[in-house]
Image (cartoon, rainbow, N blue to C red):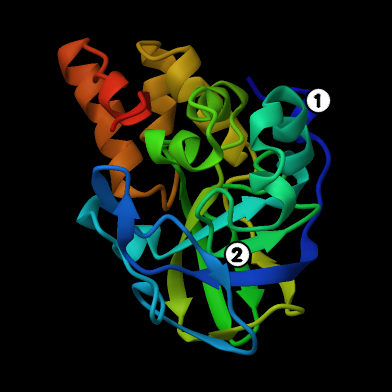
Amino acid sequence: MAGSAYTHIMTSTTISAVMIGKVTDLGNNRSAIRKSPVDGPVAIDSFGPVGDEHSDPNHGGVEKAVLHYAFDHYESFGREFPKAVEHLKKPGAFGENLSSSGITEDNIRIGDIYRIGGTLLQVAQPRQPCWKLGWLAQASRIPHRMQDTGWTGWYYRVLREGTIEAGNEMILEERINEKWPVSRLAIGIYAAPLDRVFLEEVLKIEKLGSEWRRVAERRLETGVIEPWTGRLELKG
C-alpha cells in the first residue's frame, strides 16, 4: 500500500492551536470530545494535556495521551458534508488536542519522535473514528469517511513532559519506521482486514500502540473481524 501518496516527506510545521475539553452531555451520552483552544502554555504529562478530560477510559491512557489532527482535511470534509461547514471553521471539530497544517497521516510515521515546545512526543497509533464525530458535525457519515480515507488523526505517547502552546514548532527528532505512514496502517487495517501478510507486518511495527497490535493479533488468531457498527454508527 505504500505508494506515491507517501513519498512527500515533511518533517516540521507549526502548532496552530492547543485544545482541551471537559466532560459534558452529548445527546443521551457524556463526552469530552468538544475541545476549545487554550491561550498560553498547556502542561503535558504522561496522560496528555493537564485539564483535558475523558468520559471513557478507552479514549485516554499513556498510548493515547495527545491527539493530533491535520487542519488540512477540514476543507475536503466541508465540501463533502455541507451541513458540517460551520462546525469545520475552526480547529477542535475532530476532538483533537493539537492542530497544524502540512503534516498529515501520509507523511508522519508510526514511531516518529517530535519535539514540540518542551515535550518529546512519539506517534503511537492512528485513531479509530467513532460516531461522536458525526454527531458533533451533524453528518453521520464523517466517521466512515475518516476510516475510508485514513484521515483519522494520530495519538502520541509522551516521552518527555513539558508544555506546548500555539506557535510552537513541531520538529522531527527521530524516525524509525520509514515504510509505515499512519495512513498506510489506518487504511490497510480496514481495507484488508484479514490479509495475513499485512497483519503479520503490522505486528512488526516498532513502537506501535497496544490497541492496534491487539487488533492484528486477534484477527490472526480468530480469522474474525471485530464489529465496527457500534463504534461508527450514530447513537442517541
> Do we see residue 76 in this rendering?
yes
- Front tag of 2 and 1: 2
Residue 4's label in the rendered image is 1
Residue 28's label in the rendered image is none
Q: Which is nearer the N-term, disc 2 or disc 1?
A: 1
Location of the C terminus (image quadrant) = top left
Residue 228 image point, x, y percent: 31, 21
- Figure quadrant of residue 25: bottom left
Tell me what residue is drawn at x 60 percent, y 64 percent: 98
| Classed neighbour count for the residue bearing mark 1: other residues with Cα under 10 Å, few (<14), some (14–19), many (≥20) | few
Residue 211 image point, x, y percent: 29, 43
For residue 74, above or below residue 24:
above
> Do we see residue 180 in this rendering?
no
Please state if 155 lies on the left or on the right of 54 as rendered. right
Residue 97 image point, x, y percent: 53, 64
- Specify the amino acid type for callout 2: Leu
Tell me what residue is drawn at x 63 percent, y 57 percent: 175
Tell me what residue is drawn at x 70 percent, y 57 percent: 90
Q: Which residue is mark 2?
A: 98
Estimate the spatial distance between the alpha carbons at disc 2 and disc 1, rounded to whole Å: 27 Å
